[in-house]
Amino acid sequence: MTPTIPRPHTALLPTRRQTLIVTGVVLLLSWLLHAATRTPFVAVLGRIGFVATCLLMAYSCAGAVHPRWLPARTARLLAVVVMAPLASLMTAVLTQGTHVFTYLRSVETLTGHILMVVLALIFGLTMSMWAMRSERKERERADQLQAELEKNALERELLDARLRLLQAQIEPHFLFNTLANVEALVAAGSPNAGPVLRHLIAYLRAAMPRLQDESPTLATELQLVGAYLELMRMRMPDRLQYTVAELPALAGLRFPPMALLTLVENAVRHGIDPSMSGGRVEIGGGRDAVSGKITLWVSDTGVGIAETAQPGTGLANVRTRLHAFYGADAHLDLHEQSPHGVRVELHFYPENRQ
């Protein structure tokens, strides 16, 4: 499920940030008017603070309850324009009571009242424009983050589907090859056919649940590799030797299931099996102390790479799964060994895991 970025929303009450900004502007403007007119600071602060509070509430309420046919931006500006003279008039009513009309007959007080209305309009509209611009940027930022989250979620789903498809391709490939080996033993009347078949059944009971494990590790992969090689050694005891390194430092590393097993199967099937004298399969690896890069390798002393050999689906599958699991920097290298044999290396950085 894709997480949702909280979007800025309109409410009847102003936000804490808006309240703090308006408070700062009120204090600054009150101090300036106090210094210019010599009016007591408390009186100036009371009037300007009251007008600013009315404008802020009008701005917030208009954005939340404006009619559908009127855009929120227009409704907020109209609310500020209407509230500015009303709030200024209310300050006069609150301070003068029933003598408000007598108070406003004076040219000096009327001029001061008009000045307050003009200031309320200037600062009210300016702050409203600034607030709406900030809200628009915040909405755009939220939309962009939401789009990126949805894109990442789709990429993750595509990657998971791709890995499941590759897994579905490799599992029957491995199973059918192993069953073909058992069939060959049965057809040849080998006394090892029964033990091999029993070993295969026990191995598959242990292995199949791990193939769908959502948290596969290198340790479980090496266990599968060891079990597979033991199965193959029972089939050809005189022609196959093997060594599987334990690699305790990398045991908990997340690793694509059956990727290493595919390389080992290729080594046995295309390297050791065609050789009359057989050979040895070795699995090892390590982490570079400086760069942190991990290298895993599978080597065999079999017949080597034939000149007419074509790249198989197994190696292509491993390459693709390695890229999907660890990113574009991960790669697979294939080397011929002297005097004969093949060494396949997997190189990747675990911190780049997708």
Image: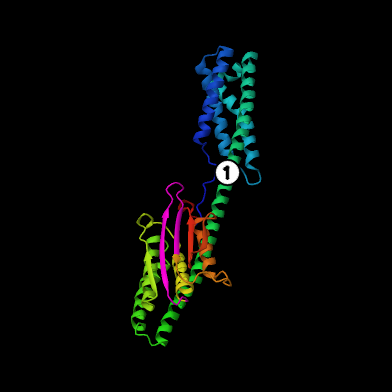
Magenta segment includes 277: yes
Furthest residue to the front? 339
Residue 217 visible within the image: no
Q: Is residue 71 left or right of residue 7?
A: right
From the viewer's perspective, is residue 323 above or below residue 93?
A: below
Residue 209 occupies which quadrant of the picture?
A: bottom left
Q: Position of residue 273 (x, y in %)?
A: 45, 76
Provide the secondary structure element on which disc 1 rests.
Answer: helix
- Work out whether residue 165 or residue 204 is closer to the camera in this orientation and state it: 204
Q: Is residue 303 left or right of residue 243?
A: right
Inspect the image, locate mark 1, and give the three-letter code of the amino acid beneath it: Arg
Q: Position of residue 41 (x, y in %)?
A: 51, 16
- Work out whether residue 296 or residue 152 is closer to the camera in this orientation and state it: 296
Residue 149 visible within the image: yes
From the viewer's perspective, is residue 193 above or below residue 56?
A: below
- Work out whether residue 286 or residue 147 is closer to the camera in this orientation and state it: 286
Write down the residue under mark 1. Answer: 141
Q: Residue at x 35, y 57 (%)?
A: 248
From the viewer's perspective, is residue 22 above or below residue 300?
A: above
Q: Is residue 210 left or right of residue 32?
A: left
Report the span colored magenta. 274-298
Magenta segment includes 301: no
Q: Residue at x 57, y 54 (%)?
A: 151
From the viewer's perspective, is residue 73 above or below residue 185?
A: above
